[in-house]
Image (spheres, grey):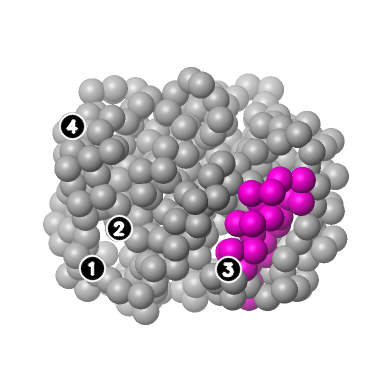
Amino acid sequence: MAAAIVHAAPALQPAQLAVVINDDEPNSVELGEYYRTARGIPDANIVHVRIPGKPRKLTAEQFADLKAEIDGKLKPGVQAVLMVWTAPYAVECNGITAAYALGYDAAQCIRTCAPGKASPYFNASALPGRVQPGMRLAMLLPTESVEEGKALIDRGKASGFRVSEAGAYYLVTSEQARNSRARFFPKPGAIPQRKLTIHTLGADALEGKRDIMIYQTGKARVPKLETLQFMPGALADHLTSTGGDLLGGGQMSSLQWLQAGATASYGTVSEPCNFWQKFPNPAVLLRHYANGSTAIEAYWRSVAWPAQGVFIGEPLAAPYRR
């Protein structure tokens, strides 16, 4: 880990991020403007669209029209897109952020439990446009609550000001099928250069921890989130089938991580089965985030087969960028 930290890649800059606002949703308009001001996003990078009705899922045809509209308004040099809304978050069985960055994958929807297509950005060390010409990453900034959205943006911005002592927590739980990525959990120990201590635990939940920078586990529902304190810029996710069904009533929504105080998360919108490749790889995520990558870059670099996934949170959070 210490050797990897020396060779950090250039991180995404505000001028390389576009913000897409849904003018049919008042919360999107307010939070989009708040984000533009907070992060100094150039006016030329603000894109306005209209998505009536707040659908959770788009058809492939609806998405193609939306993507063409967004792309037609983007300036050269944009490497990533922040969609300021909670829904839509799916395109058929694909996550909308994956469909935007890599193209809609119709084959995955024929059998969602089949292996996915490899992402060219998995474990990459460059900006997306250099990895694959024309590629742009994507993330959702949830808008269910203006107050929570502003707090999320503030946490992301605060992450760049001060490095505090923090912990990265990896849990092997009693739900055996959801432990498929446990083999990639980093070894316990300290990363002194980052004031970060790695903890690998056999437990179903954390309770009372106040220093969380990373929390990765495998549970359909993660209890005791209300007892925790997340550091600015914290990443947290759980390996389960439909965490990315953000407004669904089944398993725990990935939105609950942000509501608990995390700054970014990830979940799948359709049944992926428990391929580790369809979820953030803990070792890869930690390496890139500790190297100074932004949240959107670190999360995207950590998922090998992301077609069914949706990335959510504040994309420019970067507590270890120095």
Q: CA distance from mark 2 to mark 3?
A: 26 Å
Amino acid beneath label 4: Ala
Front in this rendered view, residue 225 or 64: 225
> How far from the left and from the top, in percent, is residue 62?
82, 37
Q: Earlier in the sequence, mark 4 or mark 2?
A: 4
Amino acid beneath label 1: Ser
Residue 164's tag is 1
Instruction: Please give left or right for residue 292 compared with residue 19 in the image.
Output: left
Residue 127's tag is 3
Asked if residue 32 is among those painted magenta in the image, a careful observer would answer yes
Instruction: Find out whether the residues at labels 4 and 2 contact each other: C-beta distance under 8 Å.
Output: no
The magenta region covers 14-36
Q: Nearer the viewer, mark 1 or mark 4?
A: 1
Q: Nearer the viewer, mark 4 or mark 2?
A: 2
Amino acid beneath label 2: Met
Q: CA distance from mark 3 to mark 4?
A: 37 Å
Amino acid beneath label 3: Leu
Q: Residues within 10 Å of mark 3 (few under 14, many from 20)?
A: many
Residue 203's tag is 4
Q: Earlier in the sequence, mark 3 or mark 4?
A: 3
Which quadrant does the N terminus fall into? bottom left
Residue 321 appears in the figure: yes
Q: Quadrant of residue 64?
A: top right
From this viewpoint, which residue is outermost toward the left?
Answer: 189
Magenta segment, prevailing SS (helix, strand or loop): helix
Q: Residues within 10 Å of mark 1 (few under 14, many from 20)?
A: some
Instruction: Look at the numbered disc 4 and give the secondary structure of its residue.
Output: loop
Q: Earlier in the sequence, mark 1 or mark 2?
A: 1
> How far from the left and from the top, in percent, is residue 35?
58, 64
Q: Earlier in the sequence, mark 1 or mark 3?
A: 3
